[in-house]
């Protein structure tokens, strides 16, 4: 083979033909030489192809190098055509078997099937930054929506559009050691503090202290001066702090004088409605400035303290409302949010997340829940402080009126043979509904009441779903829905909607809960 290559090269070098030279290069490099075992050539090429990963490459670099791998494989005759893929593409494009197609159609199907397979490999072997895209495409295909790209150009466009992050190259051990060691030179460069050349600096002067024998970077006089400056700055900072503290005490003394006058004026007024906030501020100022009062003011202070205690007791009666046990009706909100698991029926992870921002900060909510008697699912987070239903969402299902005399919202549910819900006005201005009875127990809807929310047909189909659930030996709801969604049971009349209706009417199966719960 070597002698034949020399003969061909002699011909190419004398002809000066660039096309002939290109063919020789292609034959020598891409064809892997003629003396290599063909099966070994294909195996090496396939192994190199399937082990190739994006890693830290950008999407454009990954696309270019991946296509190079494909071109090299095609040059040596490697094809990726599989019978099962041919049948799938034939059914997808022509709704016929592959063998029943004509020659031209079969050729087009082969090209399309191979391109789809290569496009999937291009997607599958991409970096970890595209992990969510791969999971979403698989979930969509499971539910019956095929969004997989059909060629490499579509795959590249999808990678650029869906994922923006790039995996950064990890720092090598040498780079990390260099960064931690402080680099080369200096006091951290490996030499000790006294490692300078004493012979060289023997007759040299330090520009900081003017003495000979050491460089400025090792000057002890400079370090002493620096320490003295730091001590002076510390003393000055302490003096400023003391001065500011004295000014704060003076301001608090004036505030205390104002507090005493206002307490005398409000001696008979202990209603605690509009002035509770100011009373709380007065008590705070009183506690901080109590040591500045004279002996003649001790009686007045004790009397004022007893009044404040009465105000706190009265405010405690107003504030005993447990926000986690009630439901608020918000006319300025468009989102429902619950925090008490006792008030919801089922919680599940949402496909999207909600970023909730307030004066207390921001919070990400990723779960949702269902409520008996309420069709729309609500957001759920244990970190929330209360349960909120948006008035805009409530009016989509029920008629809501407001009684200005009794100051309450009435949610009319007579049409569904359910009791009305009254959101009464709290002294703070919020309208709330307490689902507990007088003994503090939660009031839940009965099965008969839940059935009134659905039609007879929906109830009948839900009963069929319950029977199938029992026949399958009570699997988890997630597995049960997967069986229905993926069509594991042929010609099954039960749908996901039937399962949800059964869950809202009868709740979770008691036998399944007892069999799967441990003490």
Image: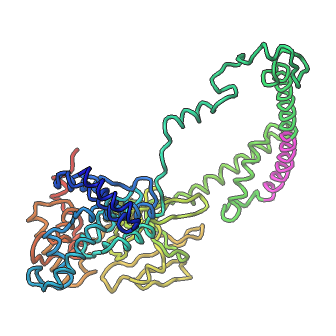
Q: Is residue 258 magenta?
A: yes
What residue is at 72 percent from the left and 48 percent from the top? 284
**Residue 424 can be seen in this image:** yes
What residue is at 76 percent from the left and 47 percent from the top? 285
Q: Nearer the viewer, residue 164 or 236?
A: 164
Residue 248: name its quadrant. Answer: top right
What residue is at 74 percent from the left and 18 percent from the top? 196
What residue is at 64 percent from the left and 31 percent from the top? 184
Residue 10 x/y as whole percent: 34, 57
Q: Horizontally, is 215 left or right of 38 in the view?
A: right
Residue 410 x/y as whole percent: 45, 80
Q: Horizontally, is 479 left or right of 242 in the view?
A: left
Q: Which of 171 and 252 is in front in this view?
A: 171
Q: Main secondary structure of the magenta part?
A: helix
Question: Which colour style is shown?
Answer: rainbow
Residue 78: name its quadrant. Answer: bottom left
Q: Horizontally, is 406 left or right of 62 in the view?
A: right
Q: Is residue 376 magenta?
A: no
Residue 369 x/y as whole percent: 36, 66
Q: Would you place residue 425 above or below residue 248 in this image?
A: below
Which residue extends farthest right? 210
**Residue 135 can be seen in this image:** no
Q: Horizontally, is 32 left or right of 181 in the view?
A: left
Residue 493 x/y as whole percent: 13, 78
Q: Give the range drawn in magenta.
A: 244-265
Q: Would you place residue 115 above or below residue 213 in this image?
A: below
Q: Nearer the viewer, residue 418 or 382?
A: 382
Q: Would you place residue 265 above or below residue 328 in this image?
A: above
């Amino acid at each position: 083979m070597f002698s034949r290559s020399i003969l061909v090269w002699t011909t190419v070098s004398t002809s000066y033909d660039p096309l002939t030279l290109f063919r020789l290069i292609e034959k020598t490099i891409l064809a892997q030489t003629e003396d290599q075992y063909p099966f070994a050539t294909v195996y090496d090429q396939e192994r190199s192809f399937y082990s190739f990963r994006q890693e830290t490459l950008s999407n454009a670099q990954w696309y270019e190098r991946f296509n190079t791998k494909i071109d090299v494989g095609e040059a040596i005759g490697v094809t990726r055509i599989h019978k099962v893929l041919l049948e799938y593409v034939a059914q997808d494009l022509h709704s016929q078997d592959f063998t029943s197609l004509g020659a031209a159609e079969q050729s087009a199907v082969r090209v399309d099937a191979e391109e789809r397979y290569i496009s999937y490999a291009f997607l599958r072997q991409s970096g970890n930054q595209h992990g969510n895209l791969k999971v979403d495409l698989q979930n969509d295909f499971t539910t019956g929506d095929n969004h997989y790209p059909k060629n490499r150009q579509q795959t590249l466009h999808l990678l650029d559009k869906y994922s923006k992050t790039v995996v950064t190259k990890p720092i090598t051990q040498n780079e990390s050691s260099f960064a931690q060691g402080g680099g080369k030179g200096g006091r951290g460069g490996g030499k000790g503090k006294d490692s300078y050349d004493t012979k060289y600096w023997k007759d040299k002067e330090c520009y900081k202290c003017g003495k000979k024998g050491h460089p400025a970077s090792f000057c002890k006089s400079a370090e002493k001066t620096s320490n003295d400056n730091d001590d002076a700055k510390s003393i000055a900072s302490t003096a400023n702090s003391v001065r500011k503290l004295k000014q704060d005490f003076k301001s608090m003394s004036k505030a205390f004088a104002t507090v005493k006058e206002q307490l005398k004026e409000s001696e008979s007024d202990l209603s605690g409605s509009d002035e509770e906030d100011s009373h709380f501020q007065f008590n705070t100022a009183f506690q901080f400035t109590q040591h500045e009062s004279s002996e003649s003011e001790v009686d007045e202070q004790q009397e004022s303290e007893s009044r404040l205690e009465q105000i706190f007791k009265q405010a405690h009666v107003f504030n005993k409302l447990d926000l986690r046990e009630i439901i608020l009706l918000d006319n300025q909100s468009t989102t429902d949010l619950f925090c008490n698991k006792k008030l919801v029926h089922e919680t599940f992870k949402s496909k999207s997340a909600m970023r909730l921002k307030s004066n207390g900060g921001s919070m990400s909510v990723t779960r949702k829940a269902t409520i008996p008697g309420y069709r729309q699912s609500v957001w759920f987070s244990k970190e929330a402080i209360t349960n909120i239903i948006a008035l805009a969402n409530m009016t989509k299902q029920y008629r809501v009126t407001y009684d200005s005399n009794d100051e309450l919202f009435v949610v009319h549910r007579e049409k569904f043979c359910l009791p009305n819900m009254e959101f009464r006005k709290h002294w703070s201005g919020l309208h709330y509904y307490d689902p507990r009875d007088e003994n503090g127990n939660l009031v839940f809807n009965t099965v008969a009441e839940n059935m009134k929310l659905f039609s007879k047909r929906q109830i009948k189909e839900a009963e069929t779903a319950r029977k199938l659930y029992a026949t399958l030996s009570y699997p988890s709801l997630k597995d049960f829905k997967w069986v229905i969604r993926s069509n594991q049971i042929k010609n099954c009349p039960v749908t996901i909607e039937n399962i949800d209706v059964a869950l809202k009417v009868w709740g979770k199966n008691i036998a399944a809960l007892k069999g799967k719960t441990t003490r």
